[in-house]
Image (tube, rainbow, N blue to C red):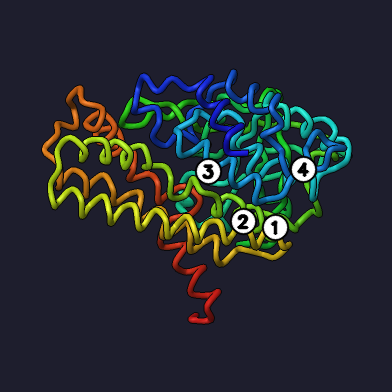
Amino acid sequence: MRERVRALIAEHVDGSDPRALANSWAVPNVAFSHALGAAGLIGMTWPKEYGGHDRSPLERYVVLEELLAAGAPVGAHWISDRQTGALLLRYGHEEEKRRWVPGMAEGKIYACIGLSEPNAGSDLASVRTTARRDGDDWIIEGQKVWTTNAHHAHVMIALVRSEPGSERNAGLSQFLIPMDAPGVTIRPIIDLTGGHDFNEVFFESVRLPATALIGVEGDGWRQVTAELSLERSGPERYLSSTALLLQLIDYARTHPSDTLTALVARLAAETWTLRLMSASVANKIARGEDPALEATMVKDLGNTFEQAMPELVQAAVEVDPAGPEPLGLVLGHLLQLSPSFSLRGGTREILKGIIARGLGLR
């Protein structure tokens, strides 16, 4: 499996801009997603009936690990493969599963996640986007923010308040919203590097059929917390800065010193430890167990690691982050980008609260 993935990467990823190899799971490349889909490397664990390949979660983990370690541009299909397809297969209406999931497995249908909202911070239970009934249809009103790759997505799964007057995590439901539906507006949010991953998404009287409701009305909180386990458990939660570690290793070969040797050893050891933790979560999924607590731990520790790496490298190496050297290019890119790593998928404070509850500490 690793050999197959590496051959595909060698064919499609030239690595001419080392900055593009960092945080690559947010970098879309439609042609590469098509190639992965044609090779059967998307939707690997899904049933063949819906375009999947009935492979094991551990085989899928191997593919993800190889893609991210190489800095492959997988952002177009990443969310569809990681969670949207699985959520639809578990809770979605049969008509919607037939409509969307096979295209996701082909690498041709892309998804985004509608969770965060303005003025809500990381308090997901305070969402104010609403869904109201109109005959057999639903009308969506509201706004989502920090929506990764919404401008490339064909569909969003959004958490909204479907019960008027409900509070906190009661009265919430999930809906499948086509991004080309009338009333959907997408506006870009440009980051410090000039990149366009994030977006604001507005819903103005967006009409959806009854089949757009995912699962049971009012059961959205339980469904979305299961979905977040998938979002938090993958190797992208510690491999976003791997391009910098690989550049550091190359640099240390030509600039040997005890300081660099010690730093490379430390970062390699932490990477290996996080890899074992993340793989154990994949193994738990393979056994049909709920990895919510362990996934949250990996996400928290992984984000701490990949955020700390640019500052550790900057302190140890005399290289210009704005200069032309590959190490400097990747370092400068991640110094600007890495502060956002601990926001996506839940802030560090939220994660520690989940871990504390899971351990019976509060």
* Residue 335 seen in this snapshot: no
Tag 4: Cα neighbours inside 10 Å, few (<14), some, or many (≥20)? many
Image marks 3 and 2: residues in contact by CB distance under 8 Å: no
x and y, in percent, of residue 252 in the image: 20, 40
Task: Classify mark 1: helix, strand or loop.
Answer: helix
Q: Which residue is mark 2?
A: 282
Residues 49 and 196: in front is 49
Image marks 3 and 4: residues in contact by CB distance under 8 Å: no
Image marks 4 and 2: residues in contact by CB distance under 8 Å: no
In-image side of 79 versus 54 (left or right): left
Instruction: Give me the C-alpha separation between circle 1 and circle 3.
Output: 16 Å
Tag 2: Cα neighbours inside 10 Å, few (<14), some, or many (≥20)? many
| Amino acid identity at mark 4 | Trp
Q: Which residue is mark 4?
A: 46
Please tell me which residue is depicted at 71% across the width and 40% down the height of the picture: 44
x and y, in percent, of residue 305 in the image: 35, 54
Instruction: Give me the C-alpha separation between circle 4 and circle 2.
Output: 15 Å
